[in-house]
Image (cartoon, coloured by chain):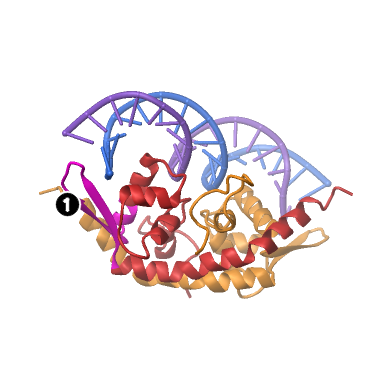
Chain colours: A red, B orange, C purple, D blue
Amino acid sequence: MLPITATNEKEKTLCPVRNVLANVSGKWQTLILLSLEDGPLRFSAIKRTVGDITQRVLTENLRMLERDGYLTRTVKPGPPIEVSYELTKLGFSLVEKIKPVVIWASNNYDKIVKSRKLYDNRDKN
Amino acid sequence: MLPITATNEKEKTLCPVRNVLANVSGKWQTLILLSLEDGPLRFSAIKRTVGDITQRVLTENLRMLERDGYLTRTVKPGPPIEVSYELTKLGFSLVEKIKPVVIWASNNYDKIVKSRKLYDNRDKN
DNA sequence: CAGTATCCTTTACGATACTG
DNA sequence: CAGTATCGTAAAGGATACTG
């Protein structure tokens, strides 16, 4: 059985699964990881790909993902300075697991929107 | 190519993928869905399984998941009133995609913790 | 038992300006 | 170019009390 149920009171830490997922289940992490699946990208390229993320938040998220070991950060001194990010083996293996979820979301979007409408109109009669 | 990059400016909505993921990538949704994979559970049973979620937040999350069509809510009048939640076909199909991510997290926890320690000790020399 | 209702805290995120 | 620094907002979540 997977330990997903609660915090570990003895060690005062989240259970492993929750501990890991906590850092990849924000608004941007998945998108950032996916943007790198075809090869390394520079900071500004990631920003362009993801679209509407601010510089501050992108930096923040990249640092977390780097810290957890999903990507590497490589600086080529400038000016202009050039920083590229690249998935690690660990990062690739995670993307491999996340991608099916993303594809699933794309495939089932219509069903879900329909379900929401139905739910919201229940008591309008 | 999957449309994960930005909001759809014309329709003023999130792209499909982000729209769907937004409702399952919180702190609790995955855990709640997983708690139901072996069959329906009552409110209190879900609460016990997940562990440290409050009643208010559990209710809130269950409503969202019901609204999106991942689970059904069935009331058996009481007292004591008895409410059970059960995954729908859609819910099961999502769990099927999410589970590999959860297993991956469990399997790679050690690696990630090690990576964090390494990262945090970089400049302590 | 399965919720609501209130109130409060945290944290993720957004906007904008500035810099080596 | 790739950040930092500041300030502000909003949404998620926590604590606690109450109820049909």
Comparing A32 with B65, the one in front is A32
* Residue A18 coordinates in the image, percent (x, y): 44, 60
> Does any portion of residue A62 appear in the rendered image?
yes
Q: Position of residue B65 (x, y in %)?
A: 65, 58
For disc 1, the marked residue is B122
Q: Quadrant of residue B104?
A: bottom left
Residue occupying the far right of the picture:
A125
**In the visual, does B30 lie left or right of A33?**
right
At x 66%, y 64%, the residue is B70
The reply to whether residue A22 is in sight is no
Residue B113 is left or right of residue A112, and the answer is left
Three-letter amino acid code at the position of disc 1: Arg
Residue at 54 percent across and 55 percent down: it is B18
Q: Nearer the viewer, residue A49 or B33?
A: A49
Residues in magenta?
A63-88
Q: Position of residue A88 (x, y in %)?
A: 29, 65
